[in-house]
Amino acid sequence: MEKERAVSEYEQARREKLAKLRDLGIDPFGGRYEGAASLADIKERYDPDDEGQVVKGAGRIVLHRDIGGLIFITLRDRTGMLQIGLSKKLLGQDWQVAKLLDLGDILGAEGTLGRTKTGEITIWVRKLSLLAKATLPPPGKWHGLQDVEARYRQRYVDLFSNPKVMKIFEDRAAIIDTMRAYLREKGFIEVETPMMQPLAGGAAARPFVTHHNTLDMDLYLRIAPELYLKRLLVGGMEKVFEINKNFRNEGISTQHNPEFTMCELYQAYADYNVMMDLMEELVCLLVRQRSRDMKLEFEDLIIDYAPPWPRRTYGELFAEHVGCEMDDTEALRKKARQIEIPEANMDDTIVISELFEHLVEDHLINPTFVKDYPAELCVLTKRKADDPKIAERFELYIGRMEISNAYTELNDPQVQQENFRIQLRGQKQTMAQMDEDYVTALKYGMPPAGGMGFGIDRLVMLLTNSPSIRDVILFPLMRPAADRKIATEITEEETDEEGVI
């Protein structure tokens, strides 16, 4: 209760300043501010032989020192920080505004560029513009916004108070730009497919259900764009990709968010080997932009991305780390019981998958292509010509996480229809239905193809050393906050003596 009253007092003090600004005829929330250069650009312009040059910048107050007739303020924008000096002699009537400023306020400052006696590059302000008055105090310099839940719920505070967080999202944008440029250079066309679909397909996952009132029909937020993208192969688009949002009504963890971003692509006349080559080349390009020796930290790991990456079969990795062959049913189930997997009502292939997840994935630290999966796990995948029990599928693992999933695509409509039927027999969800139109599309002829999807969120986690998927999603899904106070609990007592964010 004490803290709540303190917060209310600080907010009230700022509101009183707001009223005083209005009494002075100042709009506390400003307006269009033209001609401002970035703070980094202003710093670069500094010339010790020309200290009279006039500059104009804008940013948020992150440091505030009032020493009577002189106020030193540090502004921050997306490019960095710069000091401004406010002098009672230089500002005239604007001095009244200067005395009503607080940490977190957004300012425009125009004046001459010079240095202080301590050598700090500084704008000596002659014209001050208040662009937005902050009525809540920002986090303190040494505390920051450290409450993890608060950071995710109030990302707007997290971004301006934690420059490292801003850098992660700038890096994410650059990573996606590089992906797009790479795929376009390879001849891929970027397309868009429906996010609301009449059937949930393309992956084994529980969908979110919605309803279209006019058509009086249920729709599903897509769990994958796969079946639509492969329809485009039928139509003659031979290389397509989509950077898309997918939605899966499943758990939340450091590696899972119900809404997540994927890049999915398909190439006619290719197979899963072509997809391996493409994925390795793309990720190595991204790593090379960040590391000369092709090594990056991720949590407690040092991951070596130097190519070529090992290509190991599912079966050999299974035997190596589980300690038995996949066709030894008795040994499989005994092992499952030993590690408390409830195997009694599971199909053999599901037991194999569970054992792989529990006993193999933790060993996959450096990039590793795991290929040739049990065919029963791969409804949409072409079988190996010399062994129909094995599907031409791979998953790429890095840092113990699955990053991509790829196939040599199944293009036989009869086999595809039968696979769908087998899959539906094992599903208890009433929403599961046969995608008859996709089978019809295959009947018109889909060229042999390779296809792949990879998780952009997880890849960004690896490239930016972010331990949780929530660290790389601007607004991750959260439980309701109820009555919990978050940023409003931060008081100006948490700033240091000089007033610093």
Image: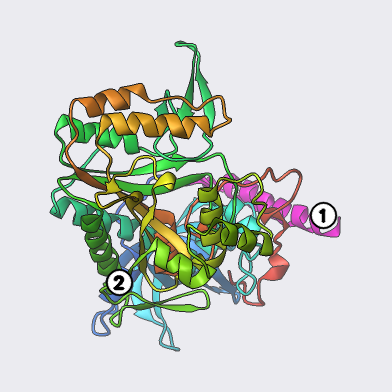
Q: Is residue 18 something that shows in the picture?
A: yes
Is there any visible trace of residue 108 in the rendered image?
no
Q: Residue furthest bottom?
A: 118
- Callout 1, which amino acid? Arg
Mark earlier in primary sequence (2, 1)? 1
Q: CA distance from mark 2 to mark 1?
A: 59 Å
Q: Which residues are magenta?
A: 1-29
Q: What's the residue at 40%, 39% (across, down)? A: 224
- Callout 2: helix, strand or loop? loop
At which x and y percent is residue 264?
31, 46
In the depicted view, which residue is nearer to us: 340 or 208?
340
Query: Is residue 443 shown in magenta?
Result: no
Disc 1: which residue: 5
Q: Which quadrant of the structure image shows residue 127?
A: bottom left
| Figure check: 338 above or below 264 | below
Question: Relative to 77, does residue 474 appear above or below in the rendering?
Answer: above
- In the image shown, does 457 or 198 lie closer to the viewer? 198
**Count of labels shown?**
2
Q: Quadrant of the N terminus?
A: bottom right
Q: Measuring 30% from the left and 71% from the top, which residue is drawn there?
A: 309
